[in-house]
Image (cartoon, helix red, strand yellow):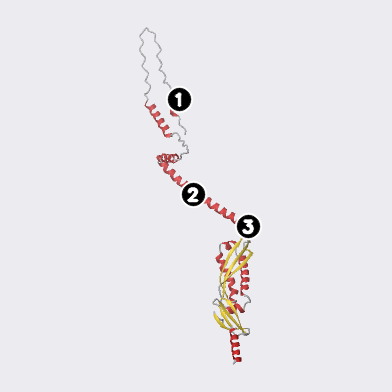
Amino acid sequence: MAVLAIIVGAGLLWMLTGVRVVQQYERGVVFRLGQVRGQVRGPGPTLLIPLVDRMRKVNVQVITMPVPAQEGITRDNVSVRVDAVVYFRVVEPIRATVDVQNYMFAMSQVAQTSLRSIIGKSELDDLLSGRENLHRGLELMLESPAVGWGVHIDRVEIKDVALPDSMKRSMARQAEADRERRARIITADGEFQAAAKLAEAATVMDATPAALQLRLLQTVVEVAAEKNSTLVLPFPVELLRFFDSGAKAAAAAAPAAPAAEPAAEVPAGEPSEPPALPRPAQAPDAAALTKSEQTPEV
């Protein structure tokens, strides 16, 4: 009985050494005498035959693998440095274990070569602004070898694009010039619209002269609101024209010079005196004429 108990205990101990536990995020690939068993062991406890079976656990979680920065020259001859990140997971544990020696290293290498290929086929503007198309192209390039390794590519993204300092300065000058061009266009457009409105206002004021006086008074009110300003008003031309018209009306209303009287009869025997010549009309004052006829200048 003691020998039987020892044999049973050794057998139980031997069986317990073959018990394995597979986690929820893992799958077990069992090799029996070097051959792969067709059934993949799921999560939970599983029993292996000691010294006969060997199990390899494969992680089926989504793996985030950063791609080291790769230097390359774009299609428009610009030297850049680009890095990316790849998200993938194992969907066929047997193929990921048997068909490739180390699927993690293989994915890293194919991601680096694909990234360099994408850099050479793209232009700088595509790397900076049109990354969605590059992401899809890079994903297709990685998907082709990954399918044979039992790996599914979930997502590929370019993280950063490093440019040379000279290119950064050139792009900064280009952006500054573009902003300056837009500012000048906006200013010129504003001046054009203002000139059009001023032309319309001039047409209205030309048809209504009183509008010009109202605008002048409004401007005076606006300027007078400033306490630290000096306002200089010119002498109104209309007032000079009023005085000028009044002087001309007075000159036209003055009476004309009296006619010459007939010569008186001289009695016989008396010496005759020569008739008095009419006195010439007095010329108007030159200063008054100059003052009345001179046109004032403003």
In percent of width and height, residue 174 lies at 58, 55
Residue found 44% across the figure and 26% down from its top: 289
Mark 2 touches mark 3? (CB < 8 Å):
no
Amino acid type indicated by mark 1: Ala
**Image position of 187 (left or right of 1):** left
Secondary structure beneath dot 1 equals helix
Looking at the rendered image, the disc whose residue lies closer to the viewer, 2 or 3, is: 3
Secondary structure beneath dot 3 equals helix
| Mark 1 nearby-residue class (10 Å; few <14, some 14–19, many ≥20) | few
Numbered label tally: 3
Residue 21 appearing in the image = yes
Q: Which mark is residue 190?
A: 2
| Mark 3 nearby-residue class (10 Å; few <14, some 14–19, many ≥20) | few
Looking at the rendered image, the disc whose residue lies closer to the viewer, 2 or 1, is: 2
Residue at the limit of the structure toward the bottom, as seen here: 1
Of marks 3 and 1, which one's residue comes earlier in the chain? 3
Residue 74 appearing in the image = no
Amino acid type indicated by mark 2: Gly
Amino acid type indicated by mark 3: Asp
